[in-house]
Image: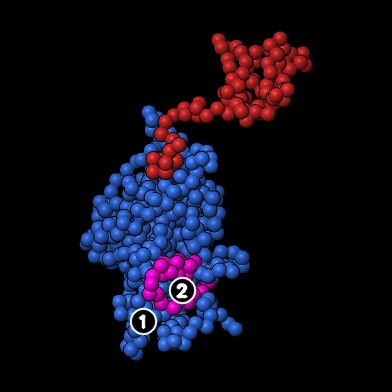
Amino acid sequence: MKKWHELVPGAVILEGGSAVRFKTGSWRAFKPLWIKENCIQCLFCWMYCPDMSVTVQDGKMTGFDYDYCKGCGICALECPGKKGNKAIIMEEEGK
Amino acid sequence: MQKVVAVTGNEAVANALRQANPDVCAAYPITPATDMMQRFASFVSNGEVDTELILVESEHSSMSACIGASAAGGRVITATSSQGLALMWEMLHIASGDNLPIIMPVVNRALSAPLNIHGDHSDAMGARDTGWIQLWSEDAQEAYDNTIQAFRIGEHLALRLPVMINLDGFIISHSIERMEYLEDKAVEDFIGEFKVVNALLDLDKPKSYGPLILPDLYIEYKRLQHEIMSRVKGVVLDVAEDFEKLSGRKYGLFESYRLEDAEVGLVIMSSAAGTAKDVVDSLRVKGIKAGLLKPRLFRPFPYGEMAASLQNLKAVAVMDRADSFGGYGPVFMEVSSALYGSSKRPALINKIYGLGGRDFLPAHAEETFLELVDIAKGGGIKTIKEYIGVRQ
């Protein structure tokens, strides 16, 4: 750990993108689960996720980045699903 | 060449701010603000400064906007008074914690309740632990001079700290005094160009301000903040030395007035110090060895220097224009802390005076000096903390 005289005055972070080193997945109490057959690829989850934890490849939702997902559940709330069946559900961690 | 003028303290300070030509000023435009920002807004409207003026909905917002603008990389000012400073509280800590050299004159006035708008130090004294440098002024001239020096102090590369320039409400802010303005060019050269440090608006080198710092590092950052504050005294003295060359006016960490051979003394700040100096002179004529110490730099507090100047007196009264209910006045607490480490020290009493704009009269200073003379003769301290001029 750094000593006090090695720190940057004002606690300024002098580089961009350093939050990638701060993994927040362990904060999670509930985990989002993707049910592929109910997914209509609307990408609402990707738009609403505050932690950029919905992974997308070639314009398609592919799952979650659990290193950073805090389990807030916004994706599951916003998910329209298919014919009344959600494509994202929340499950308690450790279950 | 200096120009002799007759102006109010607010006009003088607004003029110093104009001469500093800040990049951004974010201010709340109505009461409790004084006409200082109104005058500065006229300079903006008339094109006399290059400042972006942001009129905000509260002082909390004005300081927030100042913090953003300062972190972005600009020279930033605002001004406030009493309740306005109180509303800024949360953001004052952020300005200092982020090391942002925001310059803010504060017209010192009382806090509610009961509602009162007059001269009193309660606002800025309450903000003494917010991590801001505090300079205090006796008159319009010193308020103007302190404002100009504040830019050099706060923006110094070893500090980058916000500075509060204090002037008494109404007594200095609204009264017209004779004073001297420096020439615009001289002030511009003295203050120098703003040096940008860690600017947020540097897109090639992205940065973050105000990160989450948990128990494993927070105390280290606070220790660093204390270290930076401990450098302030030296910078204040260096800047004062340069300022004396420019203006002929001498400033230090505090002013000693007839203190060298004094036996009894007052420690008194701001405009009331002027009144008390007159009383010192008249007591000297009567053969009483009276003296006075007027603090100028209150944060950081010059403990050692002040102890050295006061330790040989027999009795000293520390005068506070603010109170700590259930405690001693804020200046008294500092002066007694300063003197505790001295092997020799005067008897010390605390007087609370002038709250809510009550006049501080020569008779009040004289009465206090006579009490000190009695204590110096061995009469003993009757009450450590007492209120001056209270009807009873």
Subunit bearing disc 2 = B
Q: Judge by depth and name the residue closer to the eye, B137 or B326.
A: B326
Residue A55 is situated, as x and y percent measured from the top left of the image, at: 58, 17
Residue B343 is covered by the magenta coloring: yes
For the point 51% across and 74% down, which residue is it? B352
Closer to the camera: disc 1 or disc 2? 1
Give the class, few, some or many, for how many residues have Cα within 10 Å of label 1's Cα (few <14, many ≥20).
many
**Which chain is rendered red in the image?**
A
Q: Which residue is mark 1?
A: B263
Per the image, is A76 magenta?
no
Q: Secondary structure at mark 1?
A: loop
Q: In the current view of this chain or complex, which residue is farthest to the bottom?
A: B286
Q: Earlier in the sequence, mark 1 or mark 2?
A: 1
Question: Which chain does the numbered disc 1 sit on?
Answer: B
Query: Is residue B378 visible in this depiction of the protein?
Result: yes
Residue drawn at x 49%, y 51% as measured from the top left: B92
Q: What's under tag 1, amino acid-wise?
A: Glu
- Quadrant including the C terminus of chain A: top right
Specify the label residue B319 is tagged with: 2
In the image, which residues are magenta?
Answer: B330-355
